[in-house]
Image (cartoon, grey):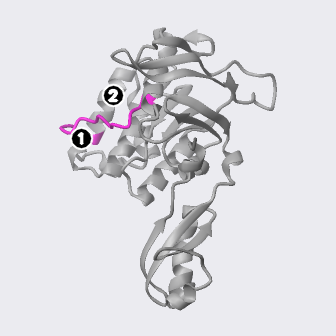
Amino acid sequence: MLTAPAPTSGAAAPAAVACRELSAGYRGQRVLEGISFEIREPAIYVVLGPNGAGKTTLFRTIAGILQPQHGSVTIDGRSIEDQATRDRLHFLSHIDGLPDGLRVEETLRLYGSVEGAAEADVERVLRLLEIEPLRSRFVSELSAGQKKRVAIARIFLRERDVYLLDEPTANLDPKVAGEIRDLVLRLSRDRVVLYSSHNLFEAREIGTYVLALRSGRLSLFDRIADLRSARYVVGVRAVAGEQYLSSASRIGDYHLFELSGPNDVADLIRELEGKGVRLREVREMGNPLEDLFAD
């Protein structure tokens, strides 16, 4: 079984989340096969994998929504089949599932009544997620990023020990996605957070550990820091000023630049434009996940 190290201070705490030989799927077909790991410390654990790797199935099974076909899920040694154990976690689906016909404040009060949250908790998350100006707007009027903030506010109405966030930045523009990651980092201190993604660089930015899924199996459980050797290469096509790109290697029409990550792209663009290069296109070359999941 793959195990995250125990906290460095004090005695080792019981595993917050443990999957043992877990297999799960739908209509008799297995999506996950023999998943085993233990989580022993509060941190953000990025569940990383391409679409179809089994990330959502894993989250649904840990949350108790989907019954294991084999194996078990426990929190601090107690089965996820017990309601009291399920009450210790919260699951944010990649589908927001917010009621379009309600206003933001009405929506949070509705979920608060189900969760047993107080009126003060609704006001707290409105402030915490910086959505007070949206309280009187209908959910149907919100942008994708605003809806995601409301969805995250919903799961923080009451504190839990474990949070499962299934691709919370999917289909959001880079600026809004960055804001959502910042919110998760701020709200998740001293908690266990499993955060699914198919983006290796997002994993680096937000996570402490990575659990990599490949074809329904756990292929890696390690610290994010150990993945920092991955290369990030962008290709540049120019309308004019190609003479300033002559020192860069090429693939076809693309001049290649190796950067530390996507956050450096804006600086590269400014540098090239400052030299007189007129850019036609800047794109990521290859997918860093290819190395992680290569045969």
Q: Is residue 33 visible in the rendered structure shown here?
A: yes
Q: Give the residue displayed 37% in from the left and 44% down from the top.
A: 148
Q: What is the x, y in percent for residue 241?
A: 49, 90
Considering the numbered disc 1 on the image, is that residue within a helix, a strand or a loop? loop
Q: Give the residue displayed 59% in from the left and 49% down from the top.
A: 291
**On residue 103, which mark appears?**
1
Query: Is residue 83 positioned above or below 117 on the image?
Result: above
Q: How many marks?
A: 2
Query: Is residue 64 positioned above or below 173 on the image?
Result: above
Query: Is residue 224 positioned above or below 259 on the image?
Result: above
Q: Residues within 10 Å of mark 2 (few under 14, many from 20)?
A: some
Q: Mostly what secondary structure, the magenta segment? A: loop
The answer to if 164 sits in the magenta stretch is no
Q: Is 12 placed left or right of 178 in the picture?
A: right
Front one among 149 and 246: 246
Question: The N terminus lies in which quarter of the figure?
Answer: top right
Front one among 10 and 25: 25
Q: What is the x, y in percent for residue 67?
A: 42, 13
Q: Give the residue displayed 44% in from the left and 59% down from the top.
A: 174
Please name the residue that numbered disc 2 is placed on.
Answer: 111
Whether the residues at callouts 2 and 1 have beta carbons within 8 Å, the answer is: no
Which residues make up the magenta segment? 91-104
Considering the numbered disc 2 on the image, is that residue within a helix, a strand or a loop? helix
Marks 2 and 1, how far apart in space? 12 Å
Q: What is the x, y in percent for residue 259?
A: 61, 67
Quadrant of the image occupied by residue 22: top right
Q: What is the x, y in percent for residue 33?
A: 51, 21
Quadrant of the image occupied by residue 112: top left
Residue type (three-letter) at the residue carrying disc 2 = Tyr
Residue type (three-letter) at the residue carrying disc 1 = Arg
Query: Is residue 60 positioned above or below 79 on the image?
Result: below
